[in-house]
Image (spheres, rainbow, N blue to C red):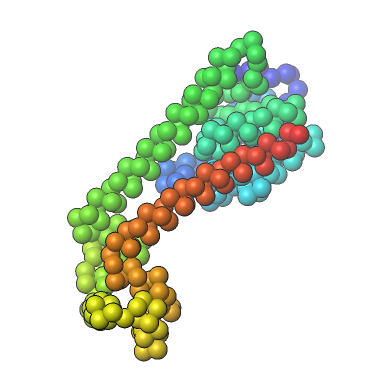
């Protein structure tokens, strides 16, 4: 959605952001800045500040993004009339975050522009399609990113199932050689001893104590703990532990996402 600016130059604060994903896509800070400068020149804008969030995910809240925080502060204090970004994806990767940031800017009576689509006008009860189109496009972009992540995870999982090394620390008794998992002779010997003790009826706490007393390092080089020994004795415990950890991380991410959105929205009140 585009808009015509007045004859006097608008003071705009530019916001650019790059994360690991953004760098891999080739849309770095320098390219984003060039796009914004080009748009500003073509639309009678005067850039008063370029705020940068480098190597920071778009899922982070404004208090975790110094560039975004500075840009919002400048708008709130009247030191800029509008926010200019390369595209809405640079504001935030999640639709809830995107909408929260837009609401903050509009609440201060300021304007939002992106180099790819022009001005994003505030919501209007008389034009519900405006909000619908913007949010659908944001949701579609979020879906596309989610599908990319899913494909990457599926690829790593399939590689691991074929015996290849996908990601993370290899299981005890294995190591990575030329991108493939192979047996680790010293760890295999320890693994056999641990399981032999377990068959004899030695408990996981006693096994951990024996390993620590003998100076046998764990996978990460530290002390042995009963939970670590339990995963070696019963492979199902390792699978269950990973499943619980994955579910806990997903729940934590959802809570953090809602918390971050709430912190951004609190600027409106």
Residue 159 visible, this angle: yes
Image position of 51 with respect to 234: above or below: above
User: Taking 248 as reference, is 92 above or below it?
Assistant: above
The quarter of the picture where residue 200 lies is bottom left
Q: Give the tally of numbered discs.
A: 0
Give the residue at the far right of this rendering: 77
Q: Residue at x 75, y 22 (%)?
A: 8
* Residue at 40%, 34% in the rendered image: 144
Query: Can residue 218 be seen here?
Result: no
Q: In the image, what residue occupies the spot 43% across and 78% down? A: 222
**Relative to 211, residue 110 above or below:** above
Q: In the image, is 165 to the left or to the right of 12?
A: left
- Check the image and name the residue furthest to the front: 201
- Residue 241 coordinates in the image, percent (x, y): 38, 60
In which quadrant is the N terminus drawn?
A: top right
Query: Observer-nearest residue: 19 or 231?
Result: 231
Q: Position of residue 40 (x, y in %)?
A: 63, 29
Q: Position of residue 225 (x, y in %)?
A: 42, 75
Q: Nearer the viewer, residue 142 or 178?
A: 142
Residue 146 as seen in the image, left or right of residue 45: left
| Percent position of residue 202, x then y | 31, 81
Q: Quadrant of residue 128?
A: top right
Q: Residue furthest left?
A: 162
* Quarter placement of the C terminus: top right
In which image quadrant can residue 147 be found?
A: top left
- Please tell me which residue is depicted at 60% across the width and 31% down the height of the picture: 99
Furthest residue in direction top, as rendered: 126
Q: Is residue 56 left or right of residue 78?
A: left
């Amino acid at each position: 959605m585009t808009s015509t600016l007045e004859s006097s130059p608008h003071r705009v604060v530019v916001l650019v952001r790059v994360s690991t994903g953004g760098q891999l896509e080739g849309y770095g800070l320098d390219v984003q800045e060039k796009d914004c400068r080009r748009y500003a020149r073509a639309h009678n804008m005067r850039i008063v500040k370029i705020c940068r969030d480098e190597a920071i995910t778009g899922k982070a809240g404004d208090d975790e993004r110094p560039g975004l925080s500075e840009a919002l502060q400048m708008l709130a204090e009247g030191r800029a009339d509008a926010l200019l970004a390369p595209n809405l994806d640079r504001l935030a990767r999640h639709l809830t975050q995107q909408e929260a940031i837009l609401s903050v800017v509009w609440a201060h009576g300021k304007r939002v522009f992106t180099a790819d689509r022009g001005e994003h006008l505030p919501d209007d009860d008389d034009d519900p399609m405006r909000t619908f189109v913007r949010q659908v496009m944001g949701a579609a972009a979020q879906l596309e990113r989610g599908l990319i992540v899913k494909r990457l995870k599926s690829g790593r999982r399939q590689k691991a199932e074929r015996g290849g090394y996908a990601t993370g620390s290899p299981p005890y008794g294995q190591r990575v050689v030329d991108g493939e998992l192979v047996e680790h002779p010293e760890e295999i010997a320890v693994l056999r001893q641990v399981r032999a003790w377990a068959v004899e009826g030695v408990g996981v706490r006693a096994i951990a104590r024996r390993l620590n007393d003998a100076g046998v390092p764990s996978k990460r080089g530290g002390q042995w703990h009963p939970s670590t020994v339990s995963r070696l004795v019963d492979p199902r415990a390792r699978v269950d532990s990973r499943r619980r950890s994955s579910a806990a991380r997903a729940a934590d991410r959802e809570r953090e996402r809602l918390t971050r959105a709430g912190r951004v929205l609190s600027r409106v009140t």
